[in-house]
Image (cartoon, helix red, strand yellow):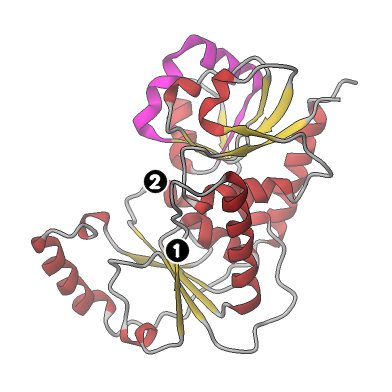
Amino acid sequence: MVPVRLMEYSRSWNLGDEIQTMAVAQHLESFDGYVDRDYLDRVEGDEFALVMNGWFCKRPDTFPPSPSVRPVWLGFHLSPHYAEVLQNETTRDLMLRSGPIGCRDEGTSRLLERHDIAAFVSGCMTTTFPLREHQPEEQAVYLVDTGGIPLPEQIRSAKCVRTSHQGAQWWSQEGKRRLAADLLEEYRSKATLVVTPRLHCALPCVAMGIPVVFVGDPDDPRLSPITGLAEMIPFPDRLRNEAVLSRAKRRSYWWREMKDHAWSGLAADIEDDKLTRVARLRQCLANLQPA
């Protein structure tokens, strides 16, 4: 049997990465420990399967991965800033042999196809968390990493809980996993609306049936997985920095586009998509096992 390992993230303090690992783990009967996403080239020992669900890569040298890694390409995102890894013949050969590559977003799929690597949009495994069974009794709007985003008066006057998916460098791997799990449970049990620019806050909340307002740059190709699943509020990235001119433009944008907007959120019905993604994951893992 080929064991399965999960990814951990020594170079990331974004709890969204941990949530991506949790999304895969929930569908496994067991797994054989963790491996660092950004050091896959340094792994030694027996072969294991690794679901490549997530963002790559902070360290381009992780491609090509060690021969110990048998990649399962589902929910894969490759930053365009690191497209040069696709020019490595060993990496290309690996993707061609183990593909087609299931991509998290359309941007990654198009990038791979431009390099003659077969790809399709598989979506993200964070959309496969189960629906919550009960609605919260009290109204609680969760504002997740909304600093610098001009919120409408309707949201400002609501009962809000401000929180963040951004961690600290000194957090341990186990601590990050525990905090990510606690956050998801808090959303599940308490949130009546979630407002966020964080993809891996929005996607699991939609999966759990929580109404979401997603604030993001409509020109960002990374955001195709959330399109149509949540209420989308366009907010250009260029307005986010703290330069004086940006602050003035942001205030103007707020008065013009956001001040009186009624944000109610949306959680699309994605139950059929969940079943498809989970079935695909299980089939890919089964295909790695010896006959």
User: In the current view of this chain or complex, which residue is farthest to the top?
Assistant: 89
**Picture coordinates of residue 12 (x, y %)?**
47, 43
Is 96 included in the stretch rendered in magenta? Answer: yes
SS label for mark 1: loop
User: In the current view of this chain or complex, which residue is farthest to the front?
Assistant: 170
Identify whether 248 is placed above or below 165: below
Front disc: 2 or 1: 1
User: Which quadrant is home to the N terminus?
Assistant: top right
Residue in the picture at 68% in, 59% down: 129
Residue in the picture at 43% in, 28% down: 59
Magenta-drawn segment:
79-103
Tag 2: amino acid: Pro
Residue nearest the observer in this picture, 72 or 180: 180
User: In the current view of this chain or complex, which residue is farthest to the left?
Assistant: 245
How far apart, in angstroms, are the residues tagged by discs 2 and 1?
23 Å
Residue nearest the observer in this picture, 216 or 44: 44
In the shown orientation, is residue 56 left or right of residue 288? left
SS label for mark 2: helix
Residue that carries the numbered disc 1 in the rendered image: 164
Label 2: few (<14), some (14–19) or many (≥20) C-alpha neighbours in 10 Å:
few
Residue in the picture at 50% in, 23% down: 62
In the shown orientation, is residue 31 left or right of residue 73? right
User: In the current view of this chain or complex, which residue is farthest to the right?
Assistant: 291
**Picture coordinates of residue 197 (x, y %)?**
40, 61
Residue in the picture at 43% in, 24% down: 60
Is 80 included in the stretch rendered in magenta? Answer: yes
Label located before the other in sequence (2 or 1): 1
Identify whether 256 is placed above or below 168: below
Q: How many numbered marks, from 0 up?
A: 2
Label disc, if present, on residue 221 of the rendered structure: 2
